[in-house]
Image (cartoon, grey):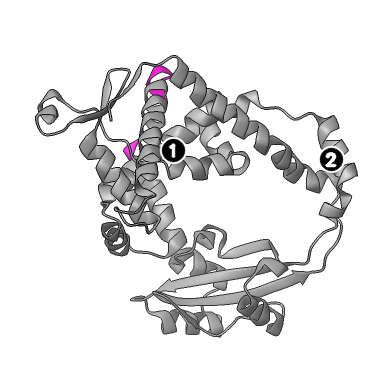
Amino acid sequence: MDGVGRGLRHALKYIAVFLFFLPVCGHAATPGDMTVNKIAAVVNGEMVTLHELRMQTMVELARRRLNPDSPEAKEVQKQVLDGLINDMLMRQDAKRYKVTVSDAEVEEELERTLKRTGMTRKQLEEGLKKERATLAMYKERIGNSLLRQRMAGYMVMRKVFVTPEEISAYYTKHKDEFAGEKTVDFSLLMLQDGKNVQDIYQKIKSGAVSFEDAARKHSADASSQNGGRMDGVIFERLPPEMKKLLSGLKDGQMSPLLRIKGGYVVIKRERINEARPLTFEEARPRIEEILKTPLLEERFKEYIGQLRAKSVIDIRI
């Protein structure tokens, strides 16, 4: 099952995003909870309390920047309850297949998120507080997301196939899509406030430390694992300021320290690659993803539908 979770990052991107933003589903309510909580739904004997539903609805309304008294609020609550039920069904199914996610895996994913966004735990907690959420809720959401991704991979990905003939036919019919685009290879060093930014920058400039080593040791960006290296980025998809900056640098040249929210960034241009048509082998992974996406979505809906069809779901609001 470990390999399934890693494989989903590419082939099931849309599922991963969808699953992560499902509401957080807490533990089943105990009899003692029932004295203070009414029941919103019962799913195979597990209860979703009205308090939990209202709490998650408030989080979702805040995320969408909607007023609790707005006409859309009632529909949002229905969607949240539907998500809570689906979430509970998938957790129950995971137990049946003995699929689990450890606390260490949740912590690793949280650290990756913080590194990727350049946020500290304190900043994350402050942001969550504005959305009426807590770090514990966020970590539970991460755990549920990882668990659901594994289940989606086990129940969905293995049942979706695209033949070599279909891939070949798509390439032949859509060759204009693979005409190629100008790309750029560059390295990124993101330094948070509080670090000795100037000292690190001067050491790189003087050659006392390489850009790659500095990125591995100090960068808050996920690319730090690769020494800050980011290859094959489509040039035209970059922000105008970034395109201007990279165009003004020479291969191997480093930018000045650039101020960003919460810290600084340094960019080193490696090289710009002019557009060239993709070969069939180069285009194959992209074509496979294009062809699989609607099949994966259909299969995922079928899986959820099957779970709901064989379950006892009692909605009480």
Q: Residue furthest right?
A: 172
Nearer to the camera, 89 or 207: 89
Q: Residue 160, percent across and down?
A: 66, 27
Question: At 54% across and 32% down in the image, what residue appears?
Answer: 4
In the rendered image, residue 100 lying in the magenta stretch gets the answer yes
Q: Residue 21, percent across and down?
A: 43, 45
Question: At 24% across and 27% down in the image, what residue appears?
Answer: 28
Instruction: Specify the amino acid type for callout 1.
Output: Leu
| Left or right of 225 in this view: 310 | left
Q: Is residue 53 visible?
A: yes
**What numbered label is drawn on residue 146?**
1
User: Relative to residue 264, is residue 222 depicted above or below?
Assistant: above
Which class describes the residues within 10 Å of circle 2: few (<14), some (14-19), or many (20+)?
Answer: some
Q: Residue furthest front?
A: 71
Kindly state the secondary structure of the residue where label 2 is placed.
helix
Q: From the viewer's perspective, is the residue at label 2 or at label 1 nearer?
A: 2
The magenta stretch spans which residues? 94-103
| Left or right of 231 in this view: 132 | left
In the rendered image, residue 24 lying in the magenta stretch gets the answer no
Distance from disc 2 to disc 1, alpha carbons, whole Å, reads 32 Å
Instruction: Specify the amino acid type for callout 2.
Output: Tyr
Question: At 41% across and 76% down in the image, what residue appears?
Answer: 263
Q: Which residue is mark 2?
A: 170
Which class describes the residues within 10 Å of circle 1: few (<14), some (14-19), or many (20+)?
Answer: many
Specify the quadrant that holds the C terminus.
top left
- Mark 2 or mark 1: which comes first in sequence? 1
User: Relative to residue 266, is residue 256 depicted above or below?
Assistant: below
Q: Main secondary structure of the magenta part?
A: loop
| Left or right of 189 in this view: 41 | left
